[in-house]
Amino acid sequence: MHGFYIYAVTAMLLFCLGLFGLVSHKNLLRKIVALNVMAGGVFLFFISIANLDPSGGVDPVPQAMVLTGIVVAISLTAFALCLARRIHEKTGQNELDTSCSIEGEDR
């Protein structure tokens, strides 16, 4: 049971670190990496929950969810990287623009 707390706190720290990176950076690649760090925290938390079975066994449902989540995270990362590359080709920028103006319209 003591190991659960170590893994759970580490998972929460990873998630918070990824959330901070997602909010604080404008660069698209850094945002994608921050999302992956957040996903790693969630996966670690699910694995720590899987070992809480009092009979000493391991619950296979959280493990299956983590395996499925890893596949989805890899696919979404590849898709996000393709979108970031496309944005860079079209605009020449790697950062998100925070202004809300529409082209040809002055605010």
Image (spheres, grey):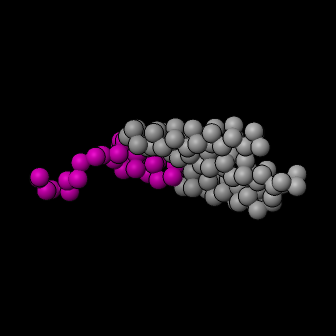
The number of numbered discs placed on residues in the rendered structure image is 0
Front in this rendered view, residue 89 or 33: 33
Side of 72 relative to 23 (left or right): right
Q: Is residue 78 visible?
A: no
* Magenta span contains residue 94: yes
Which residue is depicted at the point 51% across and 52% down?
A: 80
Side of 69 relative to 26 (left or right): right
Relative image position of residue 3 (x, y in whole percent): 75, 39
Q: Is residue 79 visible?
A: yes
Relative image position of residue 79 (x, y in whole percent): 54, 55
Q: Which residues are magenta?
A: 80-107
In this view, 55 is above or below 36: below
Front in this rendered view, residue 79 or 54: 54
Rendered-image quadrant of the N terminus: top right
Asked which quadrant contains residue 61, the reply is bottom right
Front in this rendered view, residue 56 or 97: 56
Which residue is depicted at the point 73% across and 58% down?
A: 62
Front in this rendered view, residue 34 or 101: 34
* Magenta span contains residue 5: no
Relative image position of residue 77 (x, y in whole percent): 57, 51
Residue farthest right in this picture: 56
Which residue is depicted at the point 52% across and 37% down?
A: 17
Relative image position of residue 84 (x, y in whole percent): 45, 48
